[in-house]
Each structure stands twice: as structure tokens, then as C-alpha cells.
């Protein structure tokens, strides 16, 4: 197929949040090359609010990630996709179920994402598009657009608090992947030192399921706790107002980068050169010799009751503070 004959594309990525954010550079590059191409995006209901305001996407279609292949739901969704008459599917979620859905929708032309651990996810997704668009230019940034009402909500929520706003994203303690979360006691130490130095507001962000285990963060002076309290889009809008965001490898870290927020990522088991801050942002990487192992389960935690991998324990609070100082440039 000649790329000039392509009029309408379906891009598919249902999760995780950070991965969807990393696909934004791909479809922006396509629109820059072919402004008249219409792009639809198939993703989860949770992620839809991140894309709905994006002017490069004509339509966002949602899918239940737990759908069954031979269900009425799948049949109806396939029919909806079929009616849209796509010239091409860029399948960035190449599970067997998604491939079956595309088959039912009778979309003939498909390019499929192949994960590579040798390059950043953003570049990896971009290479998938380049299989069709050989002259595809490389976008240098990822970018998100938020609903105006969410941004207004965040500004109203924070208007009584002092700047600088420093967001600590401590969520994901119970993630299936170990070696991605920083110890809660070190977050407390970090927050208090930053508050003492900058006398601003420490904004606490995290997953609802982590709320109890992260309760010690309430001991950070000058903190405001939004852990598990806000919708996804409102939580992201709060992040958009930050002067600095500090996080382990997570969706919120990549969202912050895509919003242009100065970001600091803490990395242990995961390869920062593939999943770290893209273009803007600082990656602080554990110096342990086993890093990055890219394992779901840390071998050092097999017989331990500790929640935190040694690689994340090793990252020093003062190292993070130095990165914040470089961003805020206050004495």
C-alpha cells in the first residue's frame, strides 16, 4: 500500500497509561507528514480522558480490556470498527485477542508493534509507523492536552497553597513489578528536607490501593495529600501545575513529562534508557550492579518481607534533592 492512499488510520493501545502517552509522538509525526489523514484511537475507558482533547485524534473508541473473543460485545465492537472503513491499523497492543478483533473487523492492512529493549519505547512505537510511512519524521517530544475544566479544577484546588509545588508520586507499592517504588520512609525524609529548603507545598500523589501504606507521608510538613482522592484526569491536572514531579517508573511520571513538567524519575529494576523520562526530565538510576534486571520479581526479595528492592533502597535522598535544586535553582 502506498502511504499516500491512506486516508483513515486506527491506532490501538489499551494500556498501560505510560505506554499510551509514549505513542503520542507517533501519531503527531504521522499528522505532520499527512495532515489530512484521520486518526482514530482504540484504548481503555480509563485512558480515554487523556486523549479526548487531542486535536490530532478525530475519535477515541473505548474497549473493555477483559473482553472475550467470542462474545456479543466483541462482535459489536468489531462491527463498529468495520463501519469506520479504516485503511490501516497500527496495532501497538499485539495480543491474540486484539488481532482477533481486527480480523473480525475485516481491516486488511495492519502493522504490528514489536517490543525492543534496545531503544526507548517512544522510538520503538515510532519505528512501527515507519514500516508504512518510510519518510516519517521523528518527533522529539511527547505531549498531552487536558480538558480546560480539569485544569481550572486543579488551579482552584491549589490556589491557597504556596509555591513551589513539588509533587511526590509514591504510588505503585503493590505493583506486579518490584524494583519500581521508592521506600516510604525515604519519601518522608525527602519531603521534609525539600519543605525545609523551599518552604513550598509538597503534593502527595498515588494509587488508591496504596493509601494506607503511604499514610506516613502525612508526616511531611507542608504537605497536601491527594492519594486516592481524585479522578484520574483531575489527578493529572494537579500534576500539570507542579514545579517539579518526583516519581518511580510509572504512568504519572510519563504524564508529567508529556505535560512539560520538570520531572525526576527514580529507577531500579527497569531500564531507564527504554522507560525513563523522554527528552526532558532527569533519570536517577540505582548504582547496584544488577541494575537494570528488568525482572518482575526481585531475587533479593524472595525470602524477605521487605516491600522495596535493594536497588531502590540504595538511591540517596540527597541525590534527588540535588536534581530538584538544579531545576528550581533557588539557594
Image (cartoon, rainbow, N blue to C red):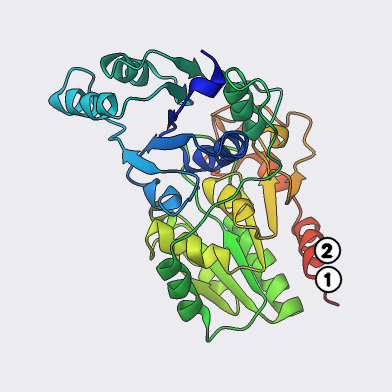
Mark 2 residue crowding within 10 angstroms, few (<14) / some (14–19) / many (20+): few
Quarter the C terminus occupies: bottom right
In the displayed orientation, state which residue is furthest to the left.
72
The residue located at (51%, 12%) in the rendering is 1
Is residue 305 or residue 296 the one in the foreground?
A: 296
Q: Are circles 2 and 1 on residues that touch, CB within 8 Å?
A: yes
Up/down of 229 relative to 12, above or below: below
Answer whether residue 212 is visible to the viewer in this image. no
Is residue 309 or residue 36 the one in the foreground?
A: 36
What element does badge 1 sit on?
loop
Residue hosting label 2: 326
The residue located at (70%, 37%) in the rendering is 272
Up/down of 243 relative to 46, above or below: below
Q: Quadrant of residue 79?
A: top left
Q: CA distance from mark 2 to mark 1?
A: 5 Å
Is residue 93 or residue 327 the one in the foreground?
A: 93
The residue located at (55%, 36%) in the rendering is 27
Residue hosting label 1: 329
Mark 1 residue crowding within 10 angstroms, few (<14) / some (14–19) / many (20+): few
- Residue 154 at x, y percent in the picture: 48, 72
- Residue 145 at x, y percent in the picture: 51, 56
- Residue 143 at x, y percent in the picture: 59, 50
What element does badge 2 sit on?
helix
The residue located at (18%, 23%) in the rendering is 75
Up/down of 208 relative to 216, above or below: above
Up/down of 108 relative to 304, above or below: above
Q: Quadrant of residue 259?
A: bottom right
In the displayed orientation, state which residue is furthest to the bottom.
160
Name the side, left or right, on which 166 lies relative to 284. Answer: left
Amino acid at each position: 500500500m502506498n502511504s499516500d492512499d491512506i486516508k483513515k488510520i486506527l491506532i490501538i493501545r489499551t494500556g498501560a497509561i505510560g505506554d499510551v502517552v509514549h505513542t503520542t509522538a507517533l501519531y503527531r509525526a504521522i499528522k505532520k507528514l499527512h495532515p489530512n489523514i484521520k486518526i482514530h484511537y482504540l484504548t481503555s475507558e480509563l485512558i480515554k480522558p487523556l486523549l479526548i482533547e487531542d486535536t490530532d485524534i478525530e475519535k477515541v473508541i473505548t474497549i473493555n480490556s477483559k473482553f472475550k473473543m467470542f462474545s456479543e460485545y466483541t462482535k459489536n465492537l468489531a462491527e463498529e470498527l468495520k463501519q469506520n472503513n479504516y485503511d490501516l491499523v497500527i496495532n501497538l497492543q499485539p495480543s491474540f485477542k486484539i488481532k482477533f478483533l481486527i480480523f473480525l473487523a475485516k481491516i486488511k492492512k495492519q502493522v504490528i508493534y514489536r517490543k525492543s529493549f534496545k531503544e526507548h519505547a517512544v522510538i520503538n512505537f515510532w519505528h512501527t509507523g515507519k514500516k508504512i510511512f518510510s519518510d516519517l519524521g521523528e518527533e522529539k517530544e511527547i505531549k498531552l492536552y487536558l480538558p480546560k475544566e480539569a485544569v481550572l479544577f486543579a488551579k482552584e484546588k491549589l490556589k491557597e497553597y504556596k509555591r513551589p509545588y513539588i509533587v511526590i508520586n509514591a504510588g505503585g507499592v503493590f505493583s506486579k513489578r518490584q524494583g519500581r517504588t521508592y521506600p516510604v520512609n525515604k519519601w518522608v525524609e525527602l519531603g521534609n528536607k525539600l519543605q525545609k529548603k523551599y518552604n513550598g507545598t509538597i503534593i502527595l500523589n498515588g494509587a488508591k490501593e496504596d493509601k494506607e501504606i503511604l499514610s506516613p507521608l502525612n508526616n511531611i510538613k507542608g504537605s497536601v495529600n491527594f492519594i486516592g482522592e481524585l479522578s484520574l484526569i483531575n489527578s493529572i491536572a494537579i500534576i500539570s501545575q507542579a514545579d517539579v514531579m518526583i516519581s518511580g517508573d510509572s504512568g504519572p511520571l510519563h504524564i508529567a513529562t508529556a505535560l512539560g513538567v520538570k520531572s525526576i524519575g527514580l529507577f531500579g529494576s527497569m531500564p531507564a534508557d527504554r522507560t525513563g523520562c523522554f527528552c526532558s526530565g532527569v533519570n536517577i538510576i540505582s548504582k547496584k550492579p544488577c541494575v537494570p534486571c528488568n525482572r518482575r520479581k526481585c531475587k533479593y526479595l524472595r525470602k524477605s518481607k521487605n516491600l522495596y528492592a535493594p536497588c531502590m533502597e540504595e538511591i540517596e535522598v540527597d541525590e534527588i534533592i540535588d536534581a530538584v535544586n538544579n531545576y528550581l535553582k533557588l539557594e
